[in-house]
Image: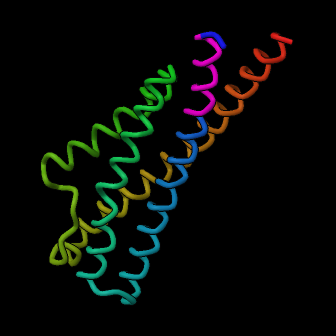
């Protein structure tokens, strides 16, 4: 195969990878929302809540970085540019050491509400990207199929 065929095949695999990793982020964010609901209903205590939520922060950032790397190397520039600000915000929170919830801060209504809004924004963002990645994946598959059919 030619270099172009290899790049088209990589684009398809990158689209599938970004789509799959985005689903992982959706599941993680949904878990956080459910955990917040458990905290609000007193089904979980604040230290356990923080332990569950905090252990997901860095893996989510790594998954988001992996998505961005896939998008860059596969030439999906628009999707990368859509992702970059949110990834930058996540990295900013980590660098400023504001990415973890502390049990004593759970009782602060404003901090808790801000954290919930941040998670809901992330969920809405990932749902929107879900459809963009799905569209991109289908487009890449059609393009790959058309290129393969033209060779016959």
Where residue 56 sits, quadrant-wise, is: bottom left
Where residue 116 sits, quadrant-wise, is: bottom left
* Towards the viewer: 84 or 19: 19
Q: As displayed, is residue 139 above or below residue 52?
A: above
* Towards the viewer: 142 or 80: 142
Q: As displayed, is residue 152 above or below residue 110?
A: above
* Towards the viewer: 110 or 57: 57
Image x and y of residue 73, in percent: 45, 23
Q: Quadrant of the C terminus?
A: top right
Image x and y of residue 128, in percent: 56, 43
Task: Please provide the residue range marked out in magenta.
Answer: 3-14
Q: Could you tell whether 148 is left or right of 24 in the image?
A: right
* Towards the viewer: 145 or 1: 1
Q: Which residue is depicted at the point 53% across and 39% down?
A: 18
Q: Which residue is depicted at the point 50% across and 29% down?
A: 79
Image x and y of residue 55, in percent: 30, 66
Is the stretch drawn in magenta largely helix, strand or loop? helix
Image x and y of residue 9, in percent: 63, 24
């Amino acid at each position: 195969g030619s270099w172009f065929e290899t790049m088209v095949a990589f684009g398809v695999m990158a689209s599938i990878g970004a789509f799959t990793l985005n689903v992982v982020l959706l599941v993680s964010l949904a878990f956080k929302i459910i955990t917040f609901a458990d905290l609000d209903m007193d089904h979980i205590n604040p230290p356990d809540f923080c332990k569950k939520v905090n252990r997901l922060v860095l893996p989510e950032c790594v998954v988001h970085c992996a998505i961005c790397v896939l998008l860059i190397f596969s030439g999906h520039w628009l999707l990368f540019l859509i992702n970059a600000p949110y990834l930058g915000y996540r990295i900013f929170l980590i660098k400023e050491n504001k990415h973890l919830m502390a049990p004593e801060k759970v009782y602060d209504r404003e901090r808790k509400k801000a954290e919930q809004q941040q998670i809901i924004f992330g969920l809405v963002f990932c749902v929107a990207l879900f459809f963009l990645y799905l569209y991109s994946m289908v487009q890449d598959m059609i393009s790959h199929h058309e290129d393969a059919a033209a060779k016959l």
